[in-house]
Amino acid sequence: MSPTPALKAGTPAPDFTLPSTPDQKVSLSEFRGRPVVLVFYPADWSPVCSDQLALYNELLPDFSPFNAEILGISVDGIWCHLAFHQERKLRIPLLADFEPKGAVARRYGVYDESTGESERALFVIDADGIIRWSYVSPVGINPGADGILKALENLSSAPKEAAHAQN
Amino acid sequence: MHKTDFTDYEAGVARLTMPVSARDHAQGPDDAPLTLVEYGDYQCPYCGAAYPVVKRLQKTLGDKLRFVFRNFPLPQAHPYAMAAAEAAEAAGTLGKFWPMHDMIYENQEELSPESLAEWAHELGLADDKLEKALEAPEIDKRLKEDRSSGIRSGLNGTPTFYINGTRYDGPPDYPSLLAVLESELSVR
C-alpha cells in the first residue's frame, strides 16, 4: 500500500517531467488544454498478452474523440520501456518514473513501498490540469477502460467543452 | 453537476451492461439458472485455452448453464482476429455460428484467412456463400455492439467472463470457474 492516499478528484494534478524515450522528455503541463489520462502500472512485461496497456492500445480509437492524451507510467527504466513498447507494438507513450525512483507515483499517492513499484492507478485530468477522477485498482485486477471513458464523457459534457465540441 | 455514480466501479464490481437477449449466440436453455458470457478473441491464446474449459463446464452443468459468446477481437495484437470474428458471424447468418466457432478454436494454431475459407467449406459453406454472407451489414453492427458492450462492462482483456452478469476476476481454469458457478447455483 502507498503511505499516502491517492490524489482525489478536484486536486490540481502535480506537474512532472519524465523521459519518454532515451532522448525525449514529456511534461504534464505540455498537455494543458486537453484531457490527460495517467495510467500508473506496476511493471513492464506483464505475463498476459491482453493486459491493461494492450487493451488501452486497442481502444485508442475510442479515446480519440475526447482528444485525450494517454500516458503510461511505471518505475521501469527508459531502455526497458523502449523494448517493451516495441515488442508489444504499443502506441501509448511510456514514461520512466525511474530516477528518483517512483517520485511521481509518490506525489500522486500511488507508490507501493513494499514492492517498490507503483500501484495500478488511473487519473483523468481535465484541460485545466485538475484531477477529475482517480481510481486505484485492487491488487491483481485489471480495471478495464469503462471508468476512464465515463470520466472523459463527464468532462466533455461540462458546458465549456460541450461548446468546444460543437466546433 | 456532472457526477456519474461510480459506486459499482469503486467497489471493483463490473457488471454486464448489455443483457443477454435473442440477438446473442447462446447454447443452453434461456431459463438456465446460470449464464456464462464470454468476450473472446479467436486468435488469443488465452481464449484458446479457455475453449475446452467452457466445453467441460457445459458438460458438467448441462441444462443449468447457458453459455453466450460475444466478440472482442484485439486486432493490434492479433492480425487475424477480426477476420475470424467476421467469418464466425457470417457463418452465423447461415445457421453455422457454433460449428464455425468450434472449428476456429479447435484449430487455432492454423488460423489464417485461407484456413477460414477452408473451414467454412468443410462446414458446407461453399466459398461464395461465406463471402456473400460477409457483406451483410448486420455483421459489422453486431461486432460493434459486442465491442462497445464489452468496454462498457469493464472488460479487461480476453477472455473476460461474466457469471450471471457480474465480471469474473478469477483464473480462467475449470476448477475456479466451476466453484464460482456452483456457489452461484447454491444461493439461488
Image (cartoon, coloured by chain):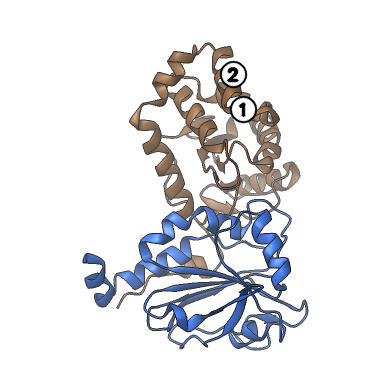
Question: What is the x, y in percent for residue A113?
Answer: 75, 83
Question: What is the x, y in percent for residue B100?
Answer: 56, 23
- Disc 1 packing (10 Å; few <14; some 14–19; many ≥20): many
> In the rendered image, which residue does mark 2 sit on?
B119
Which chain's residue wears label 2?
B
- Of residue A3 and residue A163, the one placed in the foreground of this image is A163
Q: Which mark is residue B104?
A: 1
Quarter location, residue B177: top right
**Secondary structure state at the residue bearing disc 2:** helix
Question: What is the x, y in percent for residue A66?
Answer: 37, 65
Q: Tell me if label 1 and label 2 are in contact, CB under 8 Å.
A: yes
**Secondary structure state at the residue bearing disc 1:** helix
> Residue B124, relative to residue A99: is it above or below?
above
- Mark yes or no: residue B92 visible: yes
Q: Colour of chain A?
A: blue
Question: What is the x, y in percent for residue B166?
Answer: 54, 53
Task: Give the residue displayed 59% in from the left and 48% down from the top.
Answer: B160
> Residue B37, relative to residue A127: is it above or below?
above
Task: Give the residue displayed 50% in from the left and 83% down from the top.
Answer: A8
- Disc 2 packing (10 Å; few <14; some 14–19; many ≥20): many
Q: Colour of chain B?
A: brown
Q: Amino acid at mark 2?
A: Trp
Which chain's residue wears label 1?
B
Quarter location, residue B134: top left
Task: Give the residue displayed 49% in from the left and 11% down from the top.
Answer: B126
Labels 1 and 2 in the same subunit: yes
Q: Residue furthest front?
A: A23
